[in-house]
Structure formats: C-alpha cells, structure tokens
Amino acid sequence: MTREPNARQYDRERLTVIYDTYHAPILRYIRWQVDDTETARDLSADVFRRLLDAVRRERGPERDVRAWLYRTARNIVIDFYRKQQFRTHSELFEHLTDNEPDPALLVDATLSAEKLRAAIQQLTPEQRDVIILKFVEGLSNAETARIVDKPIGAVKSLQHRALAALQRTLAPMELSA
Amino acid sequence: MTIEYELTELLDQAVTNLQEGKSSAELAVDPQINAELAPLLFVAETISSSKPIAMPSADELATDRQAFLAELDALSAEAVSPTPLARLTEWTKQSRFAAIWATLSGRGENQMVTLLARAALAVFLFVSAAGVTTVAADNSIPGDTLYPVKLQMEEARLGLTGDSAEKAVLHMRMVAERVAEMEKLAAQGEPIDEAVVNQLQLNLDNALAFAAAAPEAEMSGVLLQIQSMTQSQTNALKQLQTHVAIRDRDRDNIQNAAILTQQANDEAQFGMNQPATFRWRFGHNRPNDAPEPPALLPVPPTIEPPQEPAADDPPGAQNQFGQPEADATQPEITWSRRNAYSPCATDNSCIGDEPALHQHQLKEPPDEPLQVGPGEAGGNPEEPSCNGAGCDAPDAAPQHQQYNNQPEQDAGQSANGNQNGK
C-alpha cells in the first residue's frame, strides 16, 4: 500500500505531489458546483493556497490530505456563494418522492452536465457532497463519510434524500425541455 | 423510521450494484426494488453516466500549476519564525528554562540530577561544536583548511549509501558542488586549481559507473537525471568562462570542466538509447572472455613514475589539496575522458567501492542485445496509461491526464470511463 502524502511541514516535493494528485479531483468537485471554469480555477487555487497557509503555520493535514482538501473546498464554495448572495438553497426534501411519473420519461439518459449541475445546486451542501463524491468521483461510502465527516449511515441517508430531491427537481426540468 | 431505514439500506445496496456495472433496469427486476426506489436508481444511473462537465483547458491548468509552484517557492523562502532570536525567546517562555538553569547551576534539590545534566550539557556542546565544524566544512572551498574535511565527509556519505542509483545521484551532487566551488573561487578571485577539475572528473565517472550498475528499472531514470544535471552544469561553466576577471589558466580549467560535463551528458544520452552497450562499457554483464574493447580516445603518453626525490631536493610546490604540483616536464594529459571503459583506470583513487565495479563481471552473456533501438529508455509503451481510472487515488502518478477536459459535445462515451473512471 502506497503511503499517502501528508502535509504537516514544508516539503516542496511532497506538496507538489499533493497538488498533482489532488488538484484534478478538487477542481472537478468545485466545477460541479459553480457556473464557469474560471471560478472553478480561482476557487481550487484558493484551496491549495489554504493548504500552503496551513503548512506555513505548521498546521497542515497530517493524515487524510484528500479529506482535508475536499472539506476546505466545500467551505470555500459555501463562502463563495455566501458572498455572492444570489444563491438560494432549496429546503431539504425530507420526504420521499412519490411513485409518479415514470422516470424514463423524466430523466433523459443523455442529460447534459449543465442541467444536472443546475439540479445538484438545488441540494443542500451535504447532499451535494455525497452526490458528487459518490456518483461523479466514484468514491465509496466509507471514503465519502471520511470527507463529509459523518458516519456511513448518515451518508446513506443523505444519498437517499439527495436522489429523491434530484428526481423531483429533474422531472419538471425535463418535461419543460 | 424503520421503513425509511430499510429503504435507505436497500437503495444503497442497489446503488453499489449499479456502480459495479449493473443497470437500473436489471436492478428494478428485483422484487425488493419497489416503485419507490426504481426512479431513484434511475437518477443515480443518470448522474453516473452524464456527460463530463466542461473543464479548464490544458494550458490553463499548466498556468495554475506554475502559479502554485511559485507560491510554494515563495513559502520556502520564508522563515518558520521571524528570527532565530525570536524563536529562542519563545522557547524560553514556553519551556522550563529557569528550572533547567537551576539544575545545571547546582541549586537543584538532587545533586545526581545536576551531575547528569552537566554531563548531558557537555555532550551537547561537543556535538554542537562538531555540527558547527561540519557546517563550516560544507561551506569550504579548495584551499580552505576544512576543505579536506569536506571531501572526507563526502566519502563518508557515499559509504553510508548502499544503492548504486543513489550513489550515482550522490556523485552528481558532488559534481554540482565542484562547479559551485569553481564559481566561488572565481567570485573571490582565487585560482581555480586543476585538482578541482580532477575531482569533478572523478565524480562524473563514478556517477556514470554507478548508473551502469543500477537496476534496470532505475538506470534510465538515473541517466536522465545525470543528463539534466550535466546540461545545466555545462551551461553554468560556459557562463563562468565569460567571467572577465578570470585568468587564462583558470579559464582553461573551466573549459576542461565544461568539456567533461558535456561528455558525461553525451554518455548519459548514449546510455539511455543503448542501455546494454552502456552497461557493457562499464564492465557490467560483459563476458569474461570478451576481448578488451578498444580505447575510444588516443592513449595518452605513458607517464613515468616520479623519481624519489633526493634527500636534499627542495620540496616542490603544493596545490591547495596538499598534493605536489604537476611537473612541467611531464607530458600533458589531454583533457577528455581518458578511458571510457574504466572510470577509475587512470588512478585507483575512486571514492568508496568504485574499483569493485570493474571486477564485477558476470559469467552470463548479456541478457539483452547490445544494440537497442531508440526509445528503449522511454518506458513501456504497452503499459496502460492513467486514463482517469484510479488517478484520483493518493498513490496515483501525478499526471495531468487525470483531468477530464473533454467538452460536453466531444464526450460520447459514458462518464464511467471518462469522468471518474469508475
């Protein structure tokens, strides 16, 4: 098993490896939550800038750098939208979806990424994390749980609610398209 | 709550099956997947197979990486704390400095503790003095009193390294140090002695010899490193030649050094193109009954061993290494690789266990043909490249191909292959 790089102290080579290893997934994670690539670039640069700040203060992540980066990315995205003041989170869909209409009519298999992204933006930050990490990044429940810092059971529950919410959001979107 | 919990578990199991390759239609056949879960599974499948989202271009990503590296370098230039004095002050505030001082000065309650503390302090001071000497020696240049200590320390470092590839790299660092010494000497207006160039040649030869002895998987990487380093050193030496304040003799020595680094660069390139022949040149995998290879360069004229000086002869001039200066009557040795087959052939003064390299001749014939086509050292072309799958793992090779940069309209494949590789 390959040793995961930590970032407790300044080590140029190690920090470069961390960047090369995690920049792509972090950028993709952010891109799924913002409207354009420029913003995604800026915010992902902020994530790694915070990493360097943490290293400067000798408070960088000693273990599980990936989870640290994802959590930082999530906070940065939340801060970004807080500053923008135009984002409105939908209320959590606490109840499960009903049986109709037929999903085959609702969700096109070739659904564009932008439409899907718009639907995912309607989720709560935690639901969004679970959906992106599990279905876009392909992480397991355990890996997702480490990143969102919740028990696996909570991840399953968030997944259930997020899928139900997406199903409800996507249905009218596709019908009107 | 129980029903919802069961549904959540069922959904998660179905999602796991989905991620393992089953389709939502297949899963819907399961009687446990009721009409409530089927639409959610379909949504999950849709997300997983959606087209990749637009990402920044490769140029933009390269720009971002450069910006990060620049910040990284800026960070390295910063001190951890403002000044050493500030660090000491902080340490005394936070530590039990006063208590330690009381113990050392004998005002502590336990005399044995005081004795042990004083002994520890003595050891500490001794080690610190040795450390200061080491640092001073590390910064010394030819002609300094501590320069021989520096060379001995380099030998000691080599002795602590067992791996051929590491030894090769260590020798290349020494080459870099020799070049840096020449630059320092030039900056201080000191003569650049021929002995520095001799030492540089020894390091270059040993670097190549150890690269030839390195395991197959590592040799090309080491050679690449040698090539890169010698290239920059050649450039540095050529730059140094243009130094206006350098005397002609020093300029010749620098030029000779530049020739040597360039030759090592060519040798490393050759080794990457034809690894078997390269090893063979340095005596590895060469059959015992193989004829001696012809010399690549004209053999220099034989140098007669120096006569024992008469007791009343005046002592000759010594160079900065404490060795006698070359006799002007002796024939001059051409500055080039004197024997490409034996880096230590001209003198047996190889550092470490270099001579053993040339005795290391295996009985077996070479495993690979001596002539290998170009691209040999370029890695296995059949080796699957990181195409997104698993690239996100912490131990994945840091390559940019993990970026999924396909615009939506280009992506006709499933996102499982393109987007996340799952």
Image (cartoon, coloured by chain):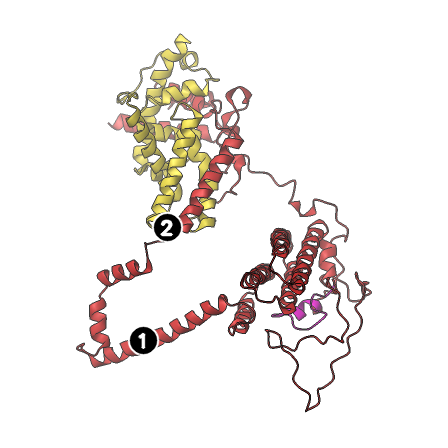
Chain colours: A yellow, B red
Q: Which residues are magenta?
A: B341-358
Q: Secondary structure at mark 1?
A: helix
Q: Is residue B222 magenta?
A: no
Which part of the image, by quadrant, shows the N terminus of chain B? Answer: top left
Q: Nearer the viewer, residue A152 or B347?
A: B347
Main secondary structure along the magenta-highlighted residues: loop
Relative to residue A85, is residue B237 depicted above or below?
Answer: below
Residue highlighted by disc 2 = A8
The residue at the point 64 percent across, 65 percent down is B197
Q: Is residue B288 left or right of residue A164?
A: right
Report the amino acid beneath label 1.
Ala
Q: At which x and y percent is residue B167? A: 58, 62
Q: Is the residue at mark 2 from the same chain as the one at mark 1?
A: no
Q: Nearer the viewer, residue A43 or B29?
A: A43
Residue A29: image tag: none
Residue highlighted by disc 1 = B120
Q: Secondary structure at mark 2?
A: loop
